[in-house]
Amino acid sequence: MSDKVLYQCPVCGLHYESEETAKECEAYCTQHNGCSLDITKLSVERSEANKKE
Ligand SMILES: [Zn+2]
């Protein structure tokens, strides 16, 4: 069971374990109208895709 608190970027909807990263993502998404790969690779969605389980 995981009761980890996740932070969502309201712009792209990806989730992050770190509030700081979610804020970075939101700032980037808002400014650039798109995501930074360096940031989205830290998202929960990405790391779950990497696990492949
Ligand atoms: Zn975002």
Image (cartoon, helix red, strand yellow):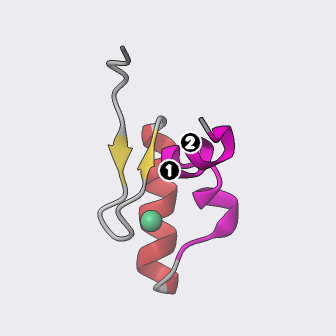
Span of residues in magenta = 35-52
Mark 2 = which residue?
A: 48
**35 relative to 42, above or below:** below
Residue at 36% across, 14% down: 1
**40 relative to 8, above or below:** below
The residue sitting at the front extreme is 53
Determine the main secondary structure of the stretch shown in magenta. helix
What residue type is disc 2 on? Glu
What secondary structure is found at the residue carrying circle 2? helix
Q: Provide residue 27's location: percent of width, then percent of height.
A: 45, 67
What secondary structure is found at the residue carrying circle 1? helix
| Distance from mark 1 CB to nearest ligand 1 atom below 8 Å | no
**5 relative to 35, above or below:** above
- Would you say 19 lies left or right of 21 here? left
**19 relative to 27, above or below:** above
The residue sitting at the bottom extreme is 33
Residue at 38% across, 18% down: 2
Mark 1 = which residue?
A: 45
Q: Provide residue 34's location: percent of width, then percent of height.
A: 51, 81
Q: Provide residue 15's location: percent of width, then percent of height.
A: 41, 48
- Would you say 49 lies left or right of 22 here? right
Check residue 45 for magenta coloring.
yes
What residue type is disc 1 on? Glu
**Can you tell which quarter of the image residue 53 is in?**
top right
